[in-house]
Amino acid sequence: MTIERPLIYLVDDTENAMKLAYDLIQMAIPTADIRKAGNGLEALMLLEEQLPDLLITDKDMPILDGIGLIKEAREKYKGPIILASANDIHDMRKSVEQTVGVDSLITCLEKPYDIKTFRELVLNSLGIKPKSP
């Protein structure tokens, strides 16, 4: 199953990181509907309106961080999540497991983004096969 116009929620409080992720998604999936939120609370409001095909969130944000967002979102959203942070990825995984348990649909990603890894992760999370160059 291929999603022609995937709905992606992008949650980050850092403007530069948000712009980079937005641009990378647009290059990989030009038809994507990308909606932005500056913190976890704003993202929860988006989740009340409509569930996305993919949720990409920063870990460290004000008001409600990425771990708190995932905990709250998992009550109704069962789709894939990419959790990104400049912190150690092993600590991030441990925090996720302690908060929501082991969840194969949650992937941790280190910042700054490796462009190829980010692109592949987004495409794989949506079940889209990358086009050959």
Image: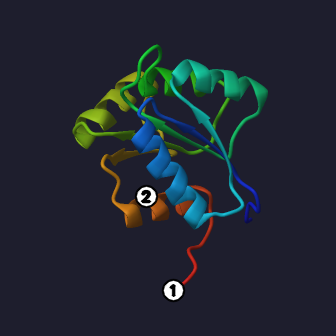
Q: Is residue 75 above or below residue 63?
A: below
Comes first in the chain, label 2 or label 1: 2
In the foreground, 91 or 21 = 21
| Mark 2–mark 1 distance (CA, rounded to whole Å) | 17 Å
Q: Quadrant of residue 88?
A: top left
Q: Is residue 55 above or below residue 40?
A: below
Can you give x and y, in whole percent of width and height, for residue 92 in the image?
30, 34
Q: Any mark on residue 133, and which?
A: 1
Q: Which residue is mark 2?
A: 118
Q: Is residue 27 left or right of residue 101?
A: right
In the foreground, 126 or 63 = 63
Can you give x and y, in whole percent of width and height, for residue 42 in the image?
60, 22
Point 47% across, 39% down: residue:
103
Point 74% across, 60% down: residue:
3
Whether residue 125 is visible here, answered yes or no, is yes
Point 38% across, 41% down: residue:
84
In the foreground, 23 or 9 = 23
Work out which residue is located at the far top of the displayed protein and give it.
63
Circle 1 packing at 10 Å, graded few (<14), some (14-19), many (20+), is few
Secondary structure, mark 1, is loop
Residue contact between numbered discs 2 and 1, judged by CB atoms under 8 Å:
no
Residue type at tag 2: Phe
Q: Is residue 102 above or below residue 98?
A: below
Q: Is residue 32 left or right of residue 12?
A: right
